[in-house]
Each structure stands twice: as C-alpha cells, then as structure tokens.
Amino acid sequence: MRAYPSRFYDRYFVGVEGDVDFYVGQFHSGNGAILEVGCGSGRITLPLARAGAEVVGLDIDDDLLSLARAKLAQEDRATQGRVVFVEADMTDFDIGRRFAQIHIPYRTFQHLLTPIDQINALECLADHLEEGGLLVFDTFDPLAEFVDDGFNAPLRRDTDFIDGQTGHQVVVWYSRDVDPDEQIFEQEMVFEEVDTAGKSLARTFARLTLRWTSRWEMEHLLAGCGFAVETLRGDFSQGVYPGYGNQVWVVRKE
Ligand SMILES: C[S@@+](CC[C@H](N)C(=O)[O-])C[C@H]1O[C@@H](n2cnc3c(N)ncnc32)[C@H](O)[C@@H]1O
C-alpha cells in the first residue's frame, strides 16, 4: 500500500502553517544551490525555484515525482531550468555534488523508522553538504501524556474535498495506531469518492508509518553525524520549542 496517493496529495497533504515561506526564507538568507530531500509533488520545490533557487528535488516515490515534473512543466522556462528531480532513497544516494543547503520539509525525516536509517541518512546528507552548509528540517514529536491517552484514533471522518479531475467529492477517513516503545505511529487513510447522491464510487487506501524522535535524541544523532545545532524552534515563526510538537531545526555541518 502506498504512503501517499499522488492523485490526492496536493489536496490532503497541505503542509504545516508557514512552512513554504520559511524554507524560501532560508534560501534567501544563504543563497546557493539547495537539495530538497523528500520533495514529493514539488509543493516547496517550485516556490523555491520561483524565488531563484537552483534546486535538486530528491524523492523515493516515482508517482509523486511524476506529479512534480508535470507541475514544473507549467512553470516559465527560467524556473524550469533551475530544477532537477532525482529518484533516490535518502539513506543511500550519491548525486556527485555538494549543496549550500539541504532542506527536508514536512516531517519527511520521520519516514526513517530506525536509528540506523536516521544515521545513514544524516551521514549521506553530510557528504552532500558544503563545509559550513546548513541542514534545515522539521519534525513532530507528540507529548508523552498524549501518546498514553488519546493519540490512538479509530477510523473516523477527517475531511473532504472536491477532486479537480472528476468533480467528485472525496471523503477522507483516518485512523492512527501508536507504538510508544518504538516511537512509531501508523496512519491509515481511506480516500472515498462519492457522487452527488452520496453513493460510494471508489476507495483508495494509504498507510503512512512514521517515527518520532525526542529533542535530545535528535541532538545526539546530529552531533554524532557532524552537525552543530544553530536553532531549534517550535514553529515556522521563530516560536520557542515548548518540549513537544513541531521541531524546526537549523543545523550546520561542522
Ligand atoms: C510528507 S511528504 C513531503 C513532500 C514535500 N516535501 C511536501 O512538503 O509536500 C514526505 C516525502 O518523503 C518521501 N520519502 C519517504 N521516504 C523517503 C526516502 N527514504 N528517501 C527519499 N524520499 C522519501 C515521500 O515519498 C514523500 O514524498
């Protein structure tokens, strides 16, 4: 089962408030070429390129990359010329060049389900960063009490939207199972297309398995892989990290 149905990606996976402006702002604060890891449908890649960044967008999912390429083809020539998409696994890749910045937006790092995978990815990313280059990424860690009481969720209706291709209403159903020992949660989603009479026409299933990492665990991982923490914030507006929730990291290759 896929993690992300590309057909519905841009309607359902809309990011975290302020993330696009934040990542574009990171480019403006440093300039230089950017490797965006887990670029998906290009939700952040394209605004970066429109802002003048040269971007390599890397992703493991060929369906999402096809969507990103189709969206890029709608852009002007100059923007198109600044973007290359690459299919690769962030734990093991070599694209033969280094970047001023590496971005890993929208909790993509949480796809790494073991500390070994996290280390492999961080080491590979360090190899692709210039000396002193920045790694910028965001993750989410739930409050411990929340994990014990309420983070599990049985299947329930989450939201709905109109599919631009068919005009059908798409109702999204969502459930979440948590394994606190492994720090892993699994989200199952059903995208149900219905007609105007409410008749079910089709269902698309998706399963997203993600790992959360505590602040201190992350600090150890980063230090062990040659990164010094510049800032950890709790949101994309410079908010203080309150000990749980969004972690927005800016770290420098030493
Ligand atoms: C939440 S989406 C983020 C997509 C996009 N950056 C955005 O903000 O909309 C996570 C992305 O990470 C990709 N991904 C997951 N595991 C990966 C891996 N091991 N290597 C590269 N990409 C991966 C998924 O295919 C997906 O496109």
Image (spheres, rainbow, N blue to C red):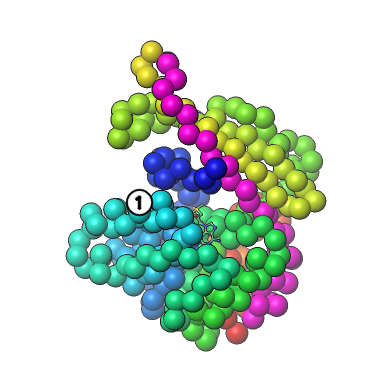
192 w.r.t. 248: above or below: above
Point out residue 254 in the picture as x, y percentages from the top left corner.
60, 84
Looking at the image, the residue that sits furthest to the top is 197
Q: Residue at x 49, y 84 (%)?
A: 130
186 w.r.t. 62: above or below: above
Examine the image and state in which quarter residue 207 appears.
top right
Q: Give left or right: position of 29 versus 176.
A: left
* Front one among 104 and 229: 104
Q: Residues within 10 Å of mark 1 (few under 14, many from 20)?
A: some
Q: Quadrant of the N terminus?
A: top right
Q: Which residues are magenta?
A: 198-226
**Residue tagged by mark 1?**
67
* Front one among 75 and 67: 67
Q: Give left or right: position of 37 versus 28.
A: right
Is residue 228 visible to us here? no
Q: Amino acid at mark 1?
A: Leu
Point out residue 169 in the picture as x, y percentages from the top left corner.
39, 26
66 w.r.t. 90: above or below: above
Is residue 222 visible to us here? yes
Q: Is mark 1 within 8 Å of ligand 1?
A: no
Q: Secondary structure at mark 1?
A: helix
Q: Residue at x 48, y 49 (%)?
A: 15
Q: Residue at x 41, y 51 (%)?
A: 63
Q: Residue at x 56, y 55 (%)?
A: 107
Examine the image and state in which quarter residue 81 appears.
bottom left
Looking at the image, the residue that sits furthest to the left is 77
* Front one among 119 and 216: 119
